[in-house]
Amino acid sequence: MPATNSNPAAVLIPEVSVPPISLRRRVTDHVMTAVSVLTVALVLLPLFAIFAYLVYKGIGSINLAFLTQTPKPVGEPGGGMANAIVGSMVILGIASLLGVPLGIGAGIFLSEYGRNRYGDIVRFVSDVLNGVPSIVIGIVAYGLVVMRQKHFSALAGGVALAIMMIPTIARTTEQMLLLVPQAIREAAYGLGVSRWRTTLSITLRTATSGVITGVMLAFARVAGETAPLLFTAFGNQFWNWKTDQPTAALSLQIFSYAISPFDEWHRQAWAGALVLIILIVGAVAAVRIAVRHGTLAGA
Amino acid sequence: MRTRFQQQMEDLREKLLRMGGLAELAVDRATQAYTERDLTRCQLVLENESLINAAEREIDELAFDILATQQPAATDLRFILAVTKINADLERVGDQAVNIAERVMDLIDLPAVELPVDIARMATAVSAMVRRALESFVEGKAELAQAVLEMDHVVDRMRDEAFIVLVRKMNEEPQVTQQALDALLVARNLERVADHATNISEDVIFWVLGADVRHHAQAASAAPRPEPREQ
Amino acid sequence: MGVGITVEHLNAFYAKTQALFDVNIIVAANHATALIGPSGCGKSTFIRCLNRMHETIPEARVEGSVRIGDLSVYNGTSATQLRRRVGMVFQKPNPFPTMSIYDNVAAGLKLNGFRNRKQLDEVVHKSLQASALWDEVKDHLHKKSGASLSGGQQQRLCIARALAVQPEVLLMDEPCSALDPISTGKIEELIFQLKEQYTIVIVTHNMQQAARVAEFTGFFLLGKMIEFDKTEKIFTNPSDKRTEDYVTGRFG
């Protein structure tokens, strides 16, 4: 290729021959790949081990009676955790109703209006709240709700769990909204859409799948919490359909059965744990499928 | 910036100037051949005609290339358009020189005759016009070009006079009709060269001022501009 | 129908930095006007002052007056109202990714309260036809998302979206700079047709595009408008030496 005197590029590129990849480098490459695979396996192993062990210990005790009956007193065979299953759903429902809107709202504030010192304060408070031990939150809910109402309730349990959900939902919502390119917002402004409308109908809508992931993360985390429910929902051996009375919850039931001295109850605790895991996984999967169904081709 | 483009433009300018030189030389040689009845010079003119034609092709090719690849705008665009036109005019000047040389070759075969027409003086004026037109291109000065436009009238008058005088001569002395006719044709060829010099000047004005002054349109309406860059 | 734009003594500031200095322009109705100039010369800032989009940047402010038709941009109306009369197309196509093609085009209307399904159908149809996209998407209006189209199609979708709101003025900020030559050609053809209905202001880096598309051109440099004239004049015989230097590629 003719290089003229006036071509500056001709000066910069020296003649270099690239040697083939040495054996040492190839071996290192394979070793590092193996190490990566190994670490993944190490991380996944406990997960599968727990699940397998739960199935092994609990599957035998799950039967129709378990899923439809309330606990029987000590000594009597049979009985189940039907009321705890339902109770958990009710408490989680209340928690979601309270926690999700507040969490998403906080996330919207932080991302759209909180790129300043006020936002930093809110972020700090949220991070602190995230680190508060769950038992302490339970006590706070006890003081705020139970003592006022003078009785335990599903509502109190829901409040406690909602407080725990909010920081996670707020932070992930904020991150997901920040990922929405500014160009999308500008497109909406250019059309004469007001800022709040843009935030709700465009920005939030674009980040929906990420926000829902955050919500499910928070949900899965609080679904298994026991300590906050100790002084709020308190547990119940019988059916309760009112939200202002002590309510059974799976986590509470598993706890009280597990620390009991009775084998029968131990077996039911295993079954309860398995059911709890299945319910959580099922809920998350159901939401994922529902979201995917509503998503357009190519979006 | 645009080193290659500047290079090409400079190239184009040089080529055109060289061609201008060749055309000027051809005219001078042809008219000298007439006044001195010199066959050698005539032959030189005929031989160098091919150089002029080759130059015309080269210049057109380069101008076309630049237009296609460099998207010149404003002054640069006007420059290239002007160059292509001046190119054509210079080639015609070369043709006229050849025509003059052919007339001279004809005359040399005939006995020399005293004619009342001063071809040499006309040739000097025409030569001056061509030179000044090329100068105005080199310097990019519209005033020099304008001066050439004014000299055209003088040359036109010279040709008209020659016509009258030579026709009268042909009537009075029919035996010198051929020589008189040749002289008349030479005068006409010179007048055509002057027209081409005028065209060249108009093209220079177009390039420099952005004003189209062909066919006697006024240049007054062109906005005053700063000096164009040296090409 | 398009309206003219009158800009007088426009100065724009981002906090303490001044971006535009005393700009005066009259943009003719139903014509395309191009704004050219080197990077950072203020042409994008200028176009954003016309529909108050520069206000989305904190601490941005403006002095001077802008009139669009009979409307005073800074004194008479809210930004959101203004932007329904002045549409904008951006440099990088930005369709709403989670919405279908139909919803994208209808977004401007739906989000401003229009719900009538039949009317929306008609507006979507006409807008997509006006932006020469209808034939390519008419079978996938509700099934495909806005982001699944090619770059050139996405930009035409954004144009349709802007047109659906029936603005009088269309502002285009380097609309073709992210597109291949064929898509660019289609959009330039579009601009040519849209001129009859709308007033178009187009910012472009590509001088040949300005020359092809616009009847009037303004040259910006360092926040000032140096020269504004008919496009042929700017490109064959500009009055200002700086314009000449930019247009012949001696800088920029």
Image (tube, coloured by chain):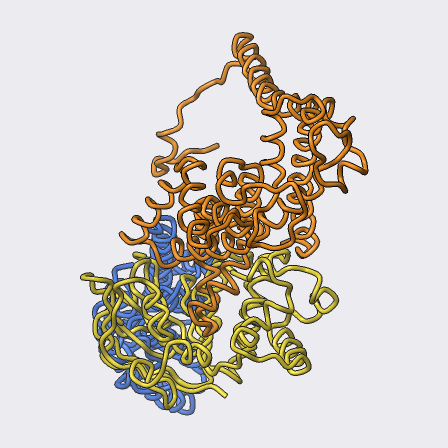
Chain colours: A orange, B blue, C yellow
Residue B81 percent location from the top left of the image: 41, 68
Can residue A35 be seen here? The reply is yes
Quadrant occupied by the C terminus of chain B: bottom left
Q: Of A71 and A2, which appears nearest the observer?
A: A71
Q: Is residue A126 left or right of residue A264?
A: left
Give the quarter of the image for residue A66.
Answer: top right
| A161 versus C130 height, above or below | above
Q: Is residue A206 shown left or right of residue C48?
A: right
Judging depth in this view, the residue of B172 and A262 nearest the camera is A262
Residue drawn at x 64%, y 82% as measured from the top left: C116
Q: Position of residue A165 (x, y in %)?
A: 49, 46
Residue A40 drawn above or below residue B42: above
Report x, y in % for residue B107.
43, 70
Q: Position of residue A90 (x, y in %)?
A: 62, 50
Residue positioned 35% across, 30% down in the render = A11
Q: As drawn, is C184 to the left or to the right of C129?
A: left
Image-quadrant location for residue A84: top right
* Count of marks placed on residues: 0
Relative to B46, residue B176 above or below: below
* Residue toward you, B28 or B136: B136
- Quadrant of the rendered structure where residue C205 is? bottom left
* Res B108 visible: no
Q: Residue furthest right?
A: A64
Q: Nearer the viewer, residue B104 or C223?
A: C223
Q: Residue furthest top?
A: A24
Which residue sits at x=39%, y=37%? A132
Residue at x-position 39% and y-position 36%: A131
Q: Is residue A211 left or right of residue A195?
A: right
